Image (cartoon, helix red, strand yellow):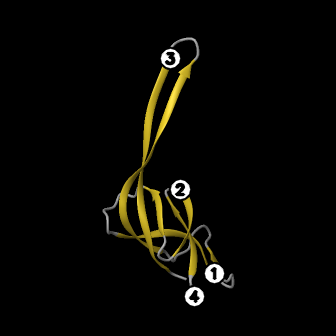
Amino acid sequence: MAYIAIIKSGGKQYLVKENDVITVDKINLPEKEKLSLETLAVFDENGKFLKLGNPSLSEKVQAEILAHAKGYKIRVARFKAKVRYRKVKGFRSQLTKLKIIKIDG
């Protein structure tokens, strides 16, 4: 029976299955390292099993860091009319790719 979990990482929540690869905000750990993620809920595909946390469960989802990467560049522009004021800044988010190894049910 395959489990589905809702995990929390970087203030955001993600719906994951085993062997999924997800992209989250940067986690300050080296590549190939395993970690446990905070689990909010676990359920099965058929809908017969459900375990909710209050706010989180004691069981953890096991994941492995595959790579660190950068997101797309975002341009942020400031402009004021009639005073020749223009500023452009760039922003590139730091990301981490995770592979979900095991979901405890």
Q: Name the residue that disc number 1 marks.
A: 45
Residue 53 image position (x, y, % from top left): 61, 72
Q: Residue at x 50, y 33 (%)?
A: 76
- Distance of label 1 from label 3 (alpha carbons): 55 Å
From the viewer's perspective, tell me whether residue 68 is left or right of residue 49.
left
Instruction: Name the residue at the top extreme.
Output: 83
- Distance of label 2 from label 3 (alpha carbons): 35 Å
Q: Where 79 sits versus 84, above or below?
A: below
From the viewer's perspective, tell me whether residue 74 is left or right of residue 30.
right
Sooner in the amino-acid sequence: mark 4 or mark 3: 4
Cβ atoms at labels 4 and 1 below 8 Å apart: yes
Q: Name the residue that disc number 2 marks.
A: 11
- Amino acid type at circle 2 is Gly
Q: Residues within 10 Å of mark 3 (few under 14, many from 20)?
A: few
When asked about the image quadrant of residue 41, the answer is: bottom right
Q: Where 69 sits versus 87, above or below?
A: below
Sooner in the amino-acid sequence: mark 2 or mark 3: 2
Sooner in the amino-acid sequence: mark 1 or mark 2: 2
Q: Residues within 10 Å of mark 1 (few under 14, many from 20)?
A: few
- Distance of label 4 from label 1 (alpha carbons): 8 Å
Label 2: state its secondary structure: loop
Residue 85's tag is 3
When asked about the image quadrant of residue 42, the answer is: bottom right
